Amino acid sequence: MIVEIVSQEDAQSDMTAAGDIHAGLGSGFDVHLIHLGDLANRLSRRAGVFSLAVDGPRFDEILADILRSLKAEIVHTHRFTDLARVGHIARRAGVNHLIHTINDTTEISAAPDLSELSSTLQIHKPLLVGVSGALPDDFDLGNRPLACVPQGIDSGRYGPGDAAPARRRIGLPQDLKIVGCASPIEHLDPFLRAITEIGDDVHVALFGDAKPDASQRRRLQQLDLEERIHVLGPWADPGHIYQAMDAYFHGPSAVPYPRPVLAAQATGIPVVATAPTCVNTIGPTGGRLLETPSVPVLAAAIREAISASPQPAARQFIKENWNVELTVDAYREIFAALSSRVSQAS
């Protein structure tokens, strides 16, 4: 029995592959997903998914009870904070194996104290998994062995659809062009200035990591973009967001293989991205990667992307090169090996 742990931050930004693993492993494995979040003010269970508030007074006790009731053999985390939070609880609940996937080095590079990360690994001794392409070749974290899985996106979950009902569902206007964006908003000023040049019939949908704070909202006022920017929030449904948009823009971020770039193309949406996004994440006809974009260059690229929508070839590129089935197959081998060890031990 496998338990996938998803933090609120990952669920908001659709960053981890936990949902894909939960959906993709099939009947060969018993997989449950536990969502940890401050907004989850009550425990619920639906289709193998639990929701649990991490700030609840009985968090440790409730989580341990869930793991015991499920007879969990493997607990899989995707953030170091989650590993530190649940590692001791999982061990006390009798979990035999902890797995931790490093989706990218953002958490590590941003950590105030790398010794704390090393201590977490030393204490809990998880099997470390790295997502190929997301980690630099010289990546080293305590010389621990690192399994590797390929990056992938679920082209069944992210697929073409009618924009009109998708826009109604998430509250976007019907008769305008929509450019979506889920990259950190602190790097989006050139993009926003480009939007001011394109014309009033082009609006922007911000979601995921694109969460404007008070100062950034003042900047939107300065650019006279308040009526053209739709902040969908971190909990918006990504599947419908991509169906609702005409193009997707991804600004600079610390993640070189961003899932939104893959998801947009899987939906058949043209992409405009800026470095350091890796060039091989964008199909030959699916969009453009801009190294040092000026505002006029950005405006021209976005106009071109809007006019080229939809892009069936972009979806085919994702299905052929970034297929989640390869990711799930790799995890299936890892989980099967660990389950075999559990069976032999018992």
Image (cartoon, rainbow, N blue to C red):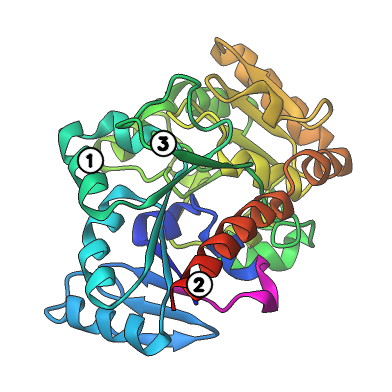
Q: Residue at x 39, y 33 (%)?
A: 105
The image position of residue 336, as x and y in percent, is 60, 64
Earlier in the chain: of badge 2 and badge 3, it is: 3
Residue 26 located within the stretch drawn in magenta: yes
Residue 159 located within the stretch drawn in magenta: no
Quadrant of the rendered image containing residue 315: top right
Quadrant of the rendered image containing residue 29: bottom right
Earlier in the chain: of badge 1 and badge 3, it is: 1
The residue that label 1 is drawn on is 117
Q: Residue at x 52, y 33 (%)?
A: 134
The image position of residue 40, as x and y in percent, is 31, 75
Separation of residues labelled 2 and 1 (CA atoms): 31 Å
Eyeballing the image, is 293 above or below 112? Answer: above
Separation of residues labelled 2 and 3 (CA atoms): 47 Å
Residue placed most toward the observer, 311 or 324: 324
The residue that label 3 is drawn on is 184
Classify 10 Å Cα crowding around label 3: few (below 14), some (14-19), many (20 and above): some
Q: Secondary structure at mark 2?
A: helix
- Which residue type carries mark 2? Gln
The image position of residue 14, as x and y in percent, is 50, 54
Magenta residue span = 24-33
- Which residue type carries mark 1? Leu
Residue placed most toward the observer, 173 or 182: 182
